[in-house]
Structure formats: C-alpha cells, structure tokens
C-alpha cells in the first residue's frame, strides 16, 4: 500500500495533462476543473456523490468524459484521455511520466527563469503551465514528491495496479487506435513475444485479470480517510460498521504492516455499540496509548477519560465512570481545555438526570451546582467556544427541565425558539431529532395530540435518513403510542417492525426497540385483561435494564393500572408508593406526580375512602392547572369526578365532565374518552335516581331524558372501549345497559344485553 499514489490519482494526472495540452474547449473547461478539484479535495461525506468524485472507477471516468467534446474534431475528451493512459505502455514510461512530464506542467521557479535568461534561452509561451500554488499545481507537486519517495517494490505495485485499473478499456482503445497495437499490459512483453499466460508474465504480474485483488488500489491516505468517515458515521448515527464494509476494511488494512491508529477507535465504537465491554475497553486503551505515544498530544488524555467514563456508565460500572469523569474535569480545567470541559460537564449533567442516586459524591463536591446553574454555565461556555451543537442541546435540556418542573409555558416556548434558531442559523442537523421529540411531548401534554402526531410524522418522512438511530427509534415509538391510544394496534406494530434490522445492530438500540415493542404489547394485553400474557411480558420487560427513567416509570404505571383492574387495591397502593419513592429531585416531573396522585385517588375511591381521594384529586388538578399540563388536567378532573360520584354528587360530576368533554375528544385518547362517557352515564343515572327518589316511581319527562342521555353515553363509551379492545370496559357498559333496560321495563332488550355481557365475560376467560 503506497502512502498517497493510487491508479485513480494517476488517471487524474493524465486528465490534467490533457487539460494543460489545450485539448479541453472553453465550454467544457469548468466541468473538467470541477471534476478534478472534487477528486483532489473530496466533497463532504454527507454528499451522495462523494464516492463518485473521490474514488472514481474507470467506468465513471468514461461516463463523465464521454459527454464532452475536445478541441480535436471528431474526438471526445474520453478519446484523448484513453490515448494518454495507454501511452504509459511500460513501467519505464510511467517513470518518465512522473519524473519528466509532471515537473514540466508547473511554472518555472525564479531561479530556473534566471538560469534560462543567463543561458540565453527565450521564455516558453507555447503551452499552458500550472501555478505551483494553485490546487492543480499543488496536487502535481505532491504526486511528484510522493513518487520520488517510493521504494522500487512499491513503484512496481503502483504500476501493476494501474494496469489492472485501465484494463477494462483495452478493447475500446484498440478498436479506436488500430495502428497503435500493443499488449494490454506491457509493451515489453509484446516486443519479447511473450503472452500473458506465460510463466514470465505470471511471475511479474500475477493474475492481472483478478478483480478481487485490491493491492495497490487504495493508499494509506485513502484508508485513513475511509476509517475517519466510518468513525464520523458511527458517532453521528450511533450504529455499527456494516459487515460488508468491515470485511473490505479488513482486506485493505491487513495488506499493510502499519495499521492506521484510528482503526482502534473505530473498533472501540463498534464493540461499544455491540455490547462487548472487554473489546471496547481494550481498543480504547490501545487507541489512546498509540495517540499519546506517537503524537505527544496532551489533550488526548482527558478525552480518553471521558470516553472511558461513557463506556463504564453504559456497562453500569457507575463508580468507575464517576471517578473517570471527575479526573477528566480536573485535567481539562488545569489545561484550560474548554471543549473537553464542556463535554464532560454536559455528560455529567445528563448522567445525573438518568442516575440521580449515583451523584451524591459529585453533588457534595459542588462541581455542577444545582441544575439551573449547571445549564447556565454550559450555555455560556458553549457560546464562548462556539460549540453550537452543545449549545443547542443545552437549550433543549433547559426547556425539558422547565417542562418537568411545570414552569411558564411562555418560557418553555422561548427555549424551543432559541434552539430552533441555533439549529437553522448554524446549519445543525443532529439536534433536530431531540428537538422534535421534546416538542412532540410538549404538544401531547397540552392535549394537542394532532400536533404531536404531525411532529413525529414530519421527522419520520423528512429527517430519518441522516440522524442518529436513537432519535428515530424513540420518535417511532412516540408515533406508535399515539396510534395505540387510538386503537390502531396493527398499524403501530407494523411501524415498529418496519424499522430496518441494520438500525438495530447496536445492542443498546436493539434493547430499546424490544422494550418499546413490549410496552405496546403490554398496553394491548392489559386492555384485553389477559393476565397470563401481561405477567409474561412484564417479566421480560423487567429483565431489560433500560437506562431511561421515564420508560421505567411508564412500565410501573402500566403495572399499577393492571393491578387496579384486577381489584388488588392493597398491592396497587404499595406499588404507587414505590413509584413515588423512585422519583428524585433530579428526575422529578410534574406529569408523573399528577399521574401518581390520580392513581392513588382512584384506588382510595374504589376502596370506599372517597374523602381521602377527593383531596388527592383536587391537588392533582391544581398542579396540572398551574403547570398548564392540560391532558393531565382532564385526567385529574375525571378522577375528581369519580370521587364525586362516590360522594353522590351527581350534578357536579355531570357539569365537570361536560365542561371538558370537547378537550377530551381532541386528545384522541380512547381510554380517557371512554372513561369520561362512563362518568356521564353514572352521573345521568344518578340524577334520574334522585328524581325517582323524590317524585316516586311514576315516569317523568326529566327522568326519561336523563335515562335516554345515559343510554347514548353508554353507546359512545362502548365504541371507544371497543376501539382499544378493552374487554372489561365493554362488559361494564353492557352490564349498565342491561340494567337500564330492566329499569325502563324492557326485559327483551335487557336479556339481549345480558347475553352479550356473558359472551364478553367468556372472552375474558372468566366464564358465566
């Protein structure tokens, strides 16, 4: 493997000679120069044409050059290019091309001009020369210098690789130049009367037609750039190296004795994402040992500690992670490395949000201060050092903190606007996923489910290709949650299963996908009241150690919901207390607080203690109203209405629920809508019962109106329960309808609804 020169770079040099010979017309000059500069200075990796310009095959060169006419009548630039590359008919011709032809392409130095003047030579004006400081001139100078540094064996490998590179064009060149017959490999073989099947040819050139032989095709510089590209993709997307690319990199790297040091860092990232702690740890040490030994880069030490802290935390070695990041912070402060310091403090902040119980030592040292102080420091320092991506992430973290603490909606919106402004003005793409996910959560809390759905759909349709897989999986789950709450389970599961396996090769992403899919299945089985399936799924999800506290808390809420449906109120209260105790100031969220209060109020109301439940429901509604978490406010009001029903406050219940019914319908949550309709059923039947108690058994128009409204609400509630496959809710509605029919004196319909009720009970597996 040469250090710089490869067959396609030799081809670019041949194209430059065609250009300097004046054979490129003015109409094609811009296109040719653009192609050359794109090959010399590769485009950004995000550009889809990167490989086409940076590593062009001979077929791609033909595709480009065939479309441009040359200054020679009847000939295209491809014809002249073919003539040039086939004029290098031997290794000696290649040597002459590099040592004589290339220096002649450059403008002469001042010393050369003075020498020619002293020798009485007239200055040349008949040909184009390249400025030594121009992009093409610098490329020619470097190619000449690299060739002079090549050892003989490497120069022979370059020649052999160039012969193999141009071989597909032999018949095309021979057909267009019948008078210039030569051997497809070396003109010296033709002169000696030796063909390519002879023993001498195979000793010198081997199997020249073997396409799988890549020796000499890639230089050390290309290998390093390829590894850099893979590292950039791993860091940006968070996945793993594809198997095909891994095999190709292995072939390229093993063909040379010196392995690029960055290869160890790539192996570290790949092993980390694969969940291989031992290999990740070894490759990380190997990379930074080589880096510090060869480059004497002192800044590498603190970055090594930061990387070490990251993998220690991912593999749940929390004490080691804290020690490593504290040392990294100390060294970064001592060496005034603000970039590393900002990264360390940002990571430490998010680590504290995920594992608050591990942060006592850091909190005691006062390294971060409180959350707001830490975010303010990061925001200021990232702006000073122009780390815009970190600044955008910090502003989003600030918005998330304000959402969790239930602060002003205007302040939260302002933080979103700032983050969006930074992303747009600085051309940032990576924070877009986190931004849209957090914005979708805000809309869901406000009860604007349609806006939350729109945000997830926009990301899935427009941004999924060039963003971290982690963001795509989370947003897809949020998208499927909205579908599941509307009863579209099949579509939700189809979207989760549509995620490409390539995105799930990383151990962490596969775990997250499994957990999210399990949560969707768990929600469906809870609605179906399938105890065996729920317990099986719940045990599997508990075995997955997901680091996201919000997801762990959501699993706890699902478990509590199922326990309440089973009627085990004592266990449900204990589980609610455990969920409340798991919340720390670092991961406190008003949404979770309101949810816990509502669950506890429901349990107390069903246990015959509505007075205690009333105070909890009022507190939940007050917190939700103050924090403008409207979805939780409607749920809290429904819980309060349940308590009021237990206290026989039917009028108040009906007024409360009817006042928020439009907003509940906008939330598109079938479970909450069905629950609200069920409350209206009970409230109207309660008011009808009050009239019956006061006015006697005779039917009155007011009492009949209440009963008819109750029947309508029963049908509405049943339809919503049917959408989400809630068998228990459907049986409850059928039981209520059969009771109403019996009270109104219609035994036939009462028996029909009673039969349907028994059928639904059989579906639950309870039996008649």
Image (cartoon, rainbow, N blue to C red):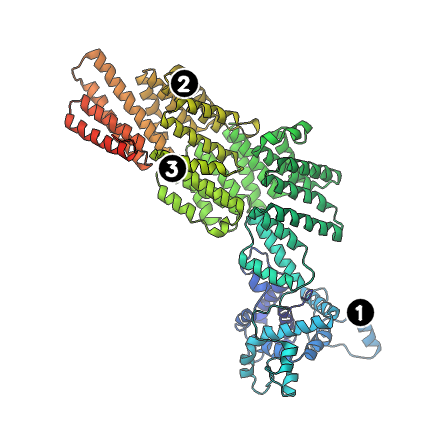
Dot 1: few (<14), some (14–19), or many (≥20) neighbours within 10 Å?
few
Which residue, given by chain and number where applicable, does mark 1 sit on? Answer: 110
Q: Nearer the viewer, residue 87 or 196?
A: 196
Can you tell which mark lies on residue 613? 2
The residue most toward the top is 694
- Answer above or below: position of 59 versus 38: below
Quadrant, the C terminus: top left
Residue 332, given in percent of the width and then of the height, sits at 72, 40
* Secondary structure category for the residue under label 2: helix
Indicate left or right for 386 with 647 as reference: right
- Label of residue 533 in the image: 3
Identify the image quadrant of residue 216. Answer: bottom right
Q: Nearer the viewer, mark 1 or mark 2?
A: 2
Q: What residue do we see at 19% from left, 25% from top?
A: 741
Label 2, residues with CA under 10 Å away: few <14, some 14-19, many ≥20: many
Q: Quadrant of the N terminus?
A: bottom right
Mark 3 surroundings: few (<14), some (14-19) or many (≥20) residues within 10 A: some
Residue 498, placed above or below residue 376: below
Quadrant of res 682: top left
Give the mark nearer the N terminus: 3 vs 2: 3
Disc 3 is placed on an element classified as helix
The quarter of the picture where residue 254 lies is bottom right
How far apart are labels 3 and 2 at the CA level? 31 Å
Q: Position of residue 708 (x, y in %)?
A: 21, 25
Q: Can you tell which of label 3 and label 2 is closer to the viewer?
A: 3
Q: Is residue 571 left or right of residue 322?
A: left
């Amino acid at each position: 493997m040469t250090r710089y020169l490869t067959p396609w770079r030799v081809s670019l040099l041949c194209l430059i000679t065609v250009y300097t010979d004046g054979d490129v017309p003015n109409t094609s000059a811009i296109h040719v120069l653009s192609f050359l500069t794109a090959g010399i200075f590769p485009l950004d990796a995000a550009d889809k044409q990167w490989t086409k310009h940076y590593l062009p095959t001979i077929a791609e060169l033909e595709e480009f050059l065939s479309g441009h006419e040359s200054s020679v009548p009847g000939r295209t630039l491809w014809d002249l290019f073919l003539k040039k590359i086939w004029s290098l008919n031997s290794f000696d011709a290649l040597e002459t091309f590099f040592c004589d032809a290339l220096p002649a392409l450059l403008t002469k130095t001042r010393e050369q001009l003075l020498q020619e003047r002293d020798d009485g030579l007239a200055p040349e004006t008949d040909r184009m020369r390249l400025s030594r400081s121009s992009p093409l001139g610098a490329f020619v100078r470097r190619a000449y210098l690299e060739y002079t540094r090549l050892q003989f064996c490497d120069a022979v490998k370059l020649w052999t690789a160039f012969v193999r590179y141009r071989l597909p064009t032999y018949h095309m060149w021979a057909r267009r130049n019948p008078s210039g017959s030569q051997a497809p490999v070396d003109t010296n073989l033709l002169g000696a009367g030796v063909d390519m099947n002879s023993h001498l040819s195979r000793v010198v050139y081997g199997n020249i037609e073997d396409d799988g032989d890549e020796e000499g095709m890639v230089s050390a510089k290309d290998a390093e750039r390829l590894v850099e590209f893979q590292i950039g993709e791993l860091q940006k997307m968070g996945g793993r190296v594809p198997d095909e690319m891994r095999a190709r990199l292995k072939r390229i790297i093993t063909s040379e004795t010196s392995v690029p040091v960055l290869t160890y860092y790539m192996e570290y990232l790949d092993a980390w994402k694969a969940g291989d702690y031992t290999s990740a740890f070894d490759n990380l040490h190997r990379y930074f040992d080589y880096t510090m030994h060869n480059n004497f880069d002192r800044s590498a030490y603190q970055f090594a500690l930061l990387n070490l802290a990251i993998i220690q935390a991912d593999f749940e070695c929390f004490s080691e992670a804290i020690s490593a990041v504290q040392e990294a912070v100390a060294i970064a402060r001592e060496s005034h490395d603000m970039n590393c310091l900002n990264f360390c403090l940002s990571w430490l902040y998010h680590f504290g949000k995920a594992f608050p119980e591990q942060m006592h030592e850091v909190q005691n040292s006062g390294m971060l201060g409180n959350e707001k102080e830490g975010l303010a420091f990061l925001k200021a320092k990232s702006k000073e050092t122009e780390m815009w991506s970190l600044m955008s992430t910090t502003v989003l973290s600030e918005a998330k903190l304000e959402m969790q603490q239930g602060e002003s909606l205007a302040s939260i919106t302002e933080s979103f606007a700032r983050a969006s402004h930074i992303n747009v003005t600085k051309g940032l793409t990576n924070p877009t996923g986190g931004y849209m996910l957090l914005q979708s959560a805000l809309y869901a809390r406000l009860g604007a489910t349609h806006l939350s759905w729109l945000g997830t759909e926009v990301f899935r349709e427009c941004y999924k290709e060039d963003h971290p897989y982690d963001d795509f999986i989370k947003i897809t789950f949020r998208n499927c949650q909205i579908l599941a709450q509307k009863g579209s389970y099949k579509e939700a599961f189809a979207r989760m299963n549509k995620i490409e396996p390539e995105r799930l090769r990383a151990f962490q992403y596969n775990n997250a996908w499994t957990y999210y899919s399990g949560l969707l299945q768990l929600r469906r089985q809870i609605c179906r009241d399938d105890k065996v399936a729920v317990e099986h799924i719940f045990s599997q999800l508990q075995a997955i150690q997901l680091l996201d506290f919000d997801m762990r808390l959501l699993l706890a809420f699902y478990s509590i919901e199922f326990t309440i449906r089973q009627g085990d109120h004592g266990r449900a209260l204990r589980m609610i207390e455990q969920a409340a105790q798991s919340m720390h100031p670092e991961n406190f969220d008003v949404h979770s607080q309101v949810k816990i209060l509502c669950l506890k109020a429901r349990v107390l109301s069903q246990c015959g203690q509505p007075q205690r439940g009333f105070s909890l429901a009022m507190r939940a509604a007050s917190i939700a109203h103050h924090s403008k978490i409207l979805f939780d406010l409607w749920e809290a009001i429904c819980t309060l209405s349940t308590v009021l029903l237990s206290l026989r406050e039917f009028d108040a219940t009906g007024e409360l629920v009817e006042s928020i019914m439009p907003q509940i319908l906008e939330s598109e949550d079938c479970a909450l809508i069905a629950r609200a309709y069920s409350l209206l059923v009970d409230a109207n039947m309660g008011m009808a019962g009050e009239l019956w108690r006061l006015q006697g058994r005779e039917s009155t128009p007011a009492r009949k109106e209440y009963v008819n409204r109750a029947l309508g609400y029963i049908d509405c509630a049943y339809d919503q329960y049917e959408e989400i496959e809630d068998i228990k809710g459907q049986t409850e509605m059928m039981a209520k309808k059969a009771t109403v029919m019996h009270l109104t004196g219609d035994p036939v319909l009462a028996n029909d609804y009673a039969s349907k009720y028994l059928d639904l009970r059989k579906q639950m597996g309870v039996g008649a």
